[in-house]
Image (cartoon, rainbow, N blue to C red):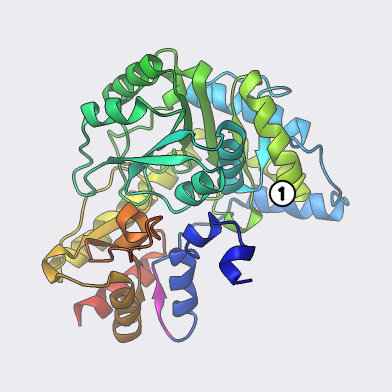
Amino acid sequence: MTQDDRINPAVNLMDESVIREMTRVSETSDIVNLAQGFPEYPVPQSVLEAAREALSEGRNRYTRTWGDPALRRDLAEHLERHWSLRYDPEEEIVITCGASEAIMASLLALLSPGDGIVIPEPIYENYLPGSRLSQARPAILPVDPFTGEWDADALDRALDSARVMILNTPANPIGKVWSAGELETVAELLEKHDVTLITDETYAWITSPGARHVPPATVRDLWRRTVTISSFSKTYAVTGWRVGFAAAPEPIMAGIRKVHDFLTVCAPAPFQHALRTALNLPIDYYRELAAAYRDRYERFSAGLREAGYRVNRPDGTYFLLVDIRHLEVPDDRRWAIDLAREKGVAGVPGSAFLYAGLPRSDGKPPDRRGIFLRLSFGKGPELLERAVERLRA
C-alpha cells in the first residue's frame, strides 16, 4: 500500500503552511522575518496581569466547551457596543482555538461532499484545505491583488451552484477592506442564491483612516445567513494564546458547536479569563493600535519605494504586497527562500495565496510564477528599518 492509499485524498491536495515554512527558513540564520504575522505591539499590562491572576488562581481546567460563560457575555456586549452585532451569548457564540479553528469547524459543519463554496482570491491559506477536507467544490472569485477590484457578474455565476461563501475582510494578504456598497451587492447575490456566508474579520480593528471595517452581518438581512468569525490574536498581540470565536444564529451555531466540541473541547482556560479584561479596554486602545500600524506602513512603504520597489496600498491588516511581476520569476517559492538567505529578509511568495499556485486535483504541477511577495509591517520600527536597508543593498 502506498502512502497515498493510506491518506485522505484531500490531504494530498494540501501544502504545509508556506507562511510557517518561511518562518523556519528565518530561524536558520540572521533573517528578518516579515513572513509570519507576529505582531510586535505591547500587550496591555492589565491583560497580562489578568492572565497571571488566572494562572495563580488555578484556572487550569476545561471551561465549558462553548467557552467561559463570562467571556461569552462580555464578547456579546463588545460586539453590540462596537459593531452593532447582536448575539445571544448562551446559544449563538462559541469560543474557539483561534479563528483558524472557528473557520475549520464552520466549514465542516456547513459543507457536505459535493457542495460548492465560493472563495475570493487571493486566498488566505486556511480556506482551501478546510474546503477540501469537507469534500466541497471550490469556485474562485478573482480579486485584483493590487486594486481590490472584482466582478459582480462573476460572483453571481459562482454562487449559482454554491452552498457557502467565505469572505475575509479586512483581507489577508491584500489588505482590502470590503466597503458597505460592495457588501450590499454581495448580500443581494447571497439572498438570490440562498447561500450561507462565513466571514473572517480577524483584522477588523487594523484599518486605515477612512476605511472603517463593516461587519457583513450588519448589511441588509445578512445576519440570519452569516457566521461571523474573528480572533483576539492580532488585536491584542496574543497570537500564542490561541483564542478566537464564531457567532451565528442558533440553528447554524448548533452545528458548529458540535464540530468544535470534538475538535478541541475548549480554548485555553486561563487566557479566556484574561481576555475578558481585553474586551473592556477603552476605545482609545483601538484607535492607537490602528494609528501605530498605519504609521509603520507609511514609513515602511516609503522606504521600499525609495529603494525601487513597487508596493500596494492596503486599507487593512498589517501586510503589504511587493509587485514582482516585472521580474518574471518562474518559481516564487524558490525565489523567496533565496531572497531570505541572500538579503536577510523573509516574505511569503504570492503563489501560496493563489489557486493555481496550490496543489491541483488534476495532478498538474502548481503555477508558481511570481506575482507578488507579502511582507508584514506588524514588526517594530527598528526591525522594519533594518529590513529596508537590507532590501536596498
Whether residue 22 sits left or right of residue 355 in the image: it is right
Q: Residue at x 80, y 49 (%)?
A: 54
**What is the secondary structure assignment of the residue under circle 1?**
helix
Q: Residue at x 70, y 33 (%)?
A: 257
In which quadrant is the C terminus drawn? bottom left
Identify the main secondary structure in magenta: loop
Magenta stretch in the rendered image: 30-34
Residue 354 as seen in the image, left or right of residue 39: left
Q: Nearer the viewer, residue 266 or 82?
A: 266
Amino acid type, residue under disc 1 in the picture? Phe
The residue where tag 1 is placed is 271
111 in relation to 53, above or below: above
Q: Is residue 7 magenta?
A: no
- Do we see residue 232 in this rendering? no
Q: How many marks?
A: 1
Q: Residues within 10 Å of mark 1 (few under 14, many from 20)?
A: many
Q: Quadrant of the N terminus?
A: bottom right
Instruction: In the rendered view, tell whether residue 204 sits above or below residue 130.
Output: above
Task: Using the rendered image of the protein, determine whether residue 143 is visible from the camera's viewpoint.
Answer: yes
Furthest residue toward front: 1
User: Residue 57: image x %, image y %?
Assistant: 87, 50
51 horizontally vs 233: left or right: right
Left or right? Give the position of 252 relative to 116: right
Give the percent coordinates (x, y) of residue 258.
72, 34
Q: Residue at x 77, y 36 (%)?
A: 68
Give how far across and how far down residue 199 sits, in percent: 47, 34
Name which quarter of the figure residue 203 lies in.
top left
Q: Position of residue 55 (x, y in %)?
A: 81, 54
Which residue is painted at 74% across and 35% down in the image? Answer: 66
